[in-house]
Image (cartoon, rainbow, N blue to C red):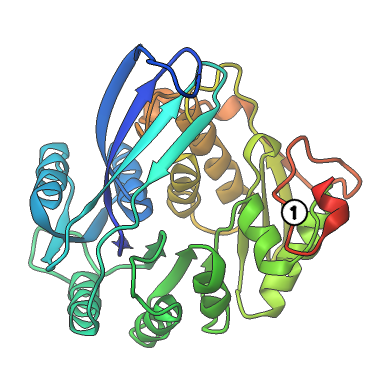
Amino acid sequence: MILTLTLNPSLDRTIEIAYLDRGTVIRAAAARLDPGGKGVNVSRALLANGIAGRAVVPFGGDEGRQLVHLLELAGLDMITVPVAGRTRSNVTLAEPDGTTTKINEPGMALSLDELDTIAEAVLIAAHPPAPGQPGAADWVVASGSLPPEVPADVYARLCRRFAEAGINVAVDTSGPALACALAAGPALVKPNLDELADATGMALRCVGDVAAAAGKLRAAGARAVLASLGADGAMLVSDEGLWYGRAPVDEPRSSVGAGDAMLAGFLAGGARGPGALAEALAWGAAAVSLPGSRVPSPADIDRTRVHVGPPDPARPLYTTPHAPPGDEAAAQ
């Protein structure tokens, strides 16, 4: 079973528009409301593909109750933890060429007592439950941004706590939270291109740069690195080897949640080696081809377009991350 923890869940409203023209009235072509948050998205993708999972979801206020209602309607197996704050709402503007503009609220502050309650809920959910329900968790996915006032080392502390219980921990976050988590030795981290550049201070211009940056994260403590590279595909670096792959998408609709679908596919595919990377790419590409933060189902996933193999270090990246602080050359 794959368990997810989302400290900063959200209601995600995606609005499809023809063109983002600032300062004008824009007519929406379509709109949808989805439960959101990185861990929630991972659980939704697993559910859509018949993979046993469970989500731990803190919630608060009217928005939180609506979030829980949407997850219940979807049939998600979850443990909800009421907290004092208000669940955030996010807005995404999606253009026809796949360009997305996101406006994310900061979320609800969590007290130390609430964080401890949430961690206990994860451990309860991870152990063998009552008969007829999924068994013990093989993985805990701790992912997403941190709510206000939550210490940057929270994922590191949770990683150690869950690992002591014999559970593999995958961390998908950014900034100081990722830097702190590396020292706790997570089984897997899943940075995107910007997060990888930020965490290493490197300018990433080619596939070889990505491999070197992933190596730095492993040297800092991560046992494996799954780097999602947007239109450039993905790379997996672990003790077993290094693989690079791509899955072209002819008509991208929205990148929202695509990295979460990729992580779900990787774990569903066995979480190791080129086979898991190929499954990750197939799920991620399927998500990009769907509107809003809709998760892919088996009918959406096309594995025939996935190509995985040894990387060509000289291959340039079609997209480049934001320049690391102080890297003037990369900013040009």
Seen as rendered, the residue at the extreme right is 314
Residue 59 place in picture, x, y as percent: 16, 59
Residue 119 place in picture, x, y as percent: 25, 78
What kind of element bears circle 1?
A: loop
Tell me if residue 184 can be seen: yes
Of residues 31 and 210, the one drawn nearer to the viewer in this rendering: 31
- Left or right: 165 in relation to 66: right
- Left or right: 45 in relation to 73: right
Residue indicated by mark 1 = 323
Residue 21 place in picture, x, y as percent: 50, 19
Binning the other alpha carbons within 10 Å of mark 1 as few (below 14), some (14 to 19) or many (20 upward) gives some
Q: Which residue is painted at 65% across and 26% down in the image?
A: 248
- Residue type, label 1: Ala
Of residues 71 and 87, the one drawn nearer to the viewer in this rendering: 87
Tell me the quarter of the picture where residue 320 sits. Answer: top right
- Left or right: 27 in relation to 280: left
Tell me the quarter of the picture where residue 8 sits. Answer: bottom left
Image position of 99 with respect to 201: above or below: above
Residue 9 place in picture, x, y as percent: 28, 54
Q: Which residue is painted at 42% across and 24% down in the image?
A: 290
Image position of 165 with respect to 101: above or below: below
Number of marks drawn: 1
Tell me if residue 256 can be seen: no
Image position of 203 with respect to 16: above or below: below
Q: Which residue is painted at 51% across and 77% down in the image?
A: 181
- Left or right: 111 in relation to 174: left
Seen as rendered, the residue at the extreme front is 23
Q: Which residue is painted at 74% across and 72% down in the image?
A: 216
